[in-house]
DNA sequence: TAGTTTAGCTAAATCGTTTAAGCAAATTGT
DNA sequence: ACAATTTGCTTAAACGATTTAGCTAAACTA
């Protein structure tokens, strides 16, 4: 477990560690090390099993070749897939990823940002929680490379990769109206995140565009922490309305999952009469024999763009903040 | 973005950086720094916004407070949840987690192990791929702290955290027999991993214990890379058998998902006649109106134990290899 | 009064790299 | 044959912490 250092090699060969460093970094030619010596060093390094100590290198160069990734919860399918995409793309650049989950808690994300910075990650990819704006502003000021994914803040121009929540939401709701649905309920996340707000705006716009009135009794909000109970309650209340609703539109897959679970357990037959929509999907949606309309987020692309934007910042010190907005795609599943 | 160092503080105050280091590490009393001076240092550090550089500390102390986590694929629900559990428990110890996916490819995991070691992680938590045994043996020899999770190797005594695959599998199959099922097919992963082998053994044992013959035409193997097609083919072949089978038992949730998807699309009615079982579950299994028997892995506990075992090794240089075997629980869902 | 303790602090080494600067010998040019 | 250049290598500082060993002055002991 005790490792071989440059110095060990240099001592063995009776040369300076500078020389060994040059050779090991492939700068032998550039640094005018003789072929003969280069060979000798490489051979000895191999023989002794030399591997560079990344910490030492990072300390000296200021580059750790590590990215920090902060999400709400890596055990959530969306974030898990995003993490994988980010991992893959980061690898392409020779980077690794250190991650942390914030649980939508700004205190937690603040701490994670701080720790990752002190661990000298070269850049941060953040799915910010509500209230993270203060940290983001600080990063901005410090010119620390970062990219926001999935959510962003209107007040601070950042590098951002998101889907077009408003348009996506609009299209889902609009489609329902075109199918003749009039009473379209929405169950939304009120975490104060702009992506969720945008989904609500899309909903409102679609109603308006079709001459329908926004009915506040058809809009239910649930919190992150009380998600399960509150979603059930929301659905329960919606189903109990006197005038039957035509559609329940969930603003993300977690809510759709919880809502569906409740309905299937307690009021399965109602699914013959109402439509279910979800802004994004979970893996088995199309296994379920329930008519549904749902979006599919371009998760791979989100991750890829996020990493690419970080890399641009790392390479060029600072770039004009760029916003990448990706479209989401839809599936209608009829039974 | 340029950070304050111990030296910066020491210069401001006209004291040595040793002193500042002692104070910042809470060793002021122990090192007989006067109260007065301690106060001054703390105040100045706060004023200047000092944060320790973990790289420098790690280089000097040999402790990076980072764990390396290597799994088959973090986008897979099982691993995503495991990662979260590990993250949480690691945080309890003041650790962060750097992760990588191997895709069951031993070359990839070998590279990840190497990189993480060179990034000086204090320990590795590995879900080893087939063929990783050579790396594991090396870690063993080097006394590098590591824990195997989910899978292990019979040849090398390691710290290991797994579920009891054989017993779990036995009970599922045994239950089917007790329900009067005779022709029980199994679709298994042939990645050469001991956990999958054990699930097959459990299957065989259960048949044997009930006086049933093992029928090789009822056992189908699929590979990691050809998973989707091969699972579909396996199910297709099973359903085409002349004598109708009674049960299809999938050895994990991915296979169960793919198999079910195929059945629902192509031969839905057969679900009235055959049972579906899965060794472990995916989130929405109980949303589907299909009778099923499936296990649920104690993922939280797996992660927690894994981290605890790593921490023990880190704290005490070396401990007697310990094997933690956790039970899995079952749900029967009848319709 | 002299010797010993103790309080309070510092110098310098160390971890393993990278890199700016520089030096002696060999080679080239004229 | 002498200066200029090139070749091949080295020295030493730096990155930012931790830690060992030790120093000085004051306080205590006898």
Image: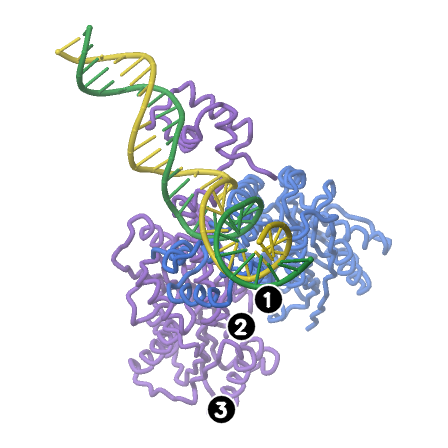
Chain colours: A purple, B blue, C yellow, D green
Residue that label 1 marks = B283
Of residues B46 and A286, the one drawn nearer to the viewer in this rendering: B46
For image coordinates 52% across by 56% down, the residue present is B75
Residue that label 3 marks = A241
Q: Are marks 3 and 1 in contact (CB under 8 Å)?
A: no
Instruction: Report how many numbered discs are placed on residues in the image.
Output: 3
Residues packed near mark 3 inside 10 Å, few (<14), some (14 to 19) or many (20 plus): few
Q: Is residue B3 left or right of residue B269?
A: left
On what subunit does the disc labeled 2 rest? A
- In the current view of this chain or complex, which residue is farthest to the bottom? A242
The quarter in which the N terminus of chain B is drawn is: bottom left
Spatial CA span between label 2 and label 1: 9 Å
Residues packed near mark 2 inside 10 Å, few (<14), some (14 to 19) or many (20 plus): many
Q: Do labels 3 and 1 share a chain?
A: no
Q: Which of marks 2 and 3 is in front?
A: 2
Label 2 residue SS: helix
Of residues A29 and B243, the one drawn nearer to the viewer in this rendering: A29
**Above or below: residue A81 compared with residue A137:** above
Q: Do labels 2 and 1 share a chain?
A: no
Instruction: Using the rendered image of the protein, determine whether residue B321 is visible from the camera's viewpoint.
Output: yes
Q: Are marks 2 and 3 on the same chain?
A: yes
**Residue B77 percent coordinates (x, y):** 57, 60
Label 1 residue SS: loop
On what subunit does the disc labeled 1 rest? B
Residue A39 numbered mark, or none: none
**Residue A78 percent coordinates (x, y):** 48, 63
Q: Which of marks 3 and 1 is in front?
A: 1
Spatial CA span between label 2 and label 3: 21 Å
Residue that label 2 marks = A257
**Residue A238 percent coordinates (x, y):** 49, 86
Spatial CA span between label 3 and label 1: 30 Å
Q: Do the residues labelled 2 and 1 touch (CB within 8 Å)?
A: yes
């Amino acid at each position: 477990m005790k490792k071989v250092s440059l110095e060990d090699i240099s001592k063995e060969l009776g040369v300076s560690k500078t020389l060994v460093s040059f050779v090991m970094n492939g700068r032998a030619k550039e640094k005018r090390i003789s072929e003969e010596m280069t060979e000798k060093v490489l051979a000895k390094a191999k023989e002794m099993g030399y591997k560079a100590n990344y910490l030492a290198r990072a300390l000296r160069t200021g580059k750790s070749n590590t990215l920090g990734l902060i999400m709400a919860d890596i055990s959530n399918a969306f974030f898990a897939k995003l993490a994988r995409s980010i991992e893959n793309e980061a690898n392409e650049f020779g980077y690794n990823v250190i991650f942390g989950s914030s649980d939508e808690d700004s205190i937690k994300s603040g701490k994670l940002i701080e720790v990752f910075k002190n661990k000298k990650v070269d850049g941060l990819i953040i799915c910010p929680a509500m209230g993270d704006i203060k940290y983001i502003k600080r990063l901005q000021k410090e010119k620390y490379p970062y990219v926001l994914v999935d959510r962003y803040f209107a007040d601070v121009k950042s590098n951002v990769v998101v889907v077009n929540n408003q348009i996506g939401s609009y299209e889902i709701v609009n489609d329902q109206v075109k199918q003749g649905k009039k009473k379209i309920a929405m169950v939304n996340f009120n975490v104060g995140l702009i992506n969720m707000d945008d989904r609500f705006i899309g909903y409102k716009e679609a109603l308006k565009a079709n001459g329908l009135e926004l009915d506040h009794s058809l809009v239910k909000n649930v919190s992150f922490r009380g998600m399960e109970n509150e979603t059930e309650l929301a659905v329960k209340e919606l189903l109990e309305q006197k005038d039957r609703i035509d559609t329940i539109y969930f603003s993300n897959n977690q809510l759709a999952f919880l809502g569906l679970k409740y309905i299937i357990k307690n009021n399965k037959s109602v699914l013959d009469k109402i439509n279910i929509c979800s802004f994004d999907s979970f893996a088995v949606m199309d296994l379920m024999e329930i008519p549904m309309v749902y979006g599919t987020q371009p998760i791979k692309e989100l991750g890829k763009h996020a990493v690419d934007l970080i890399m641009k910042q790392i390479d060029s010190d600072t770039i004009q903040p760029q916003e990448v907005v990706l479209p989401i795609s839809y599936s209608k599943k009829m039974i």
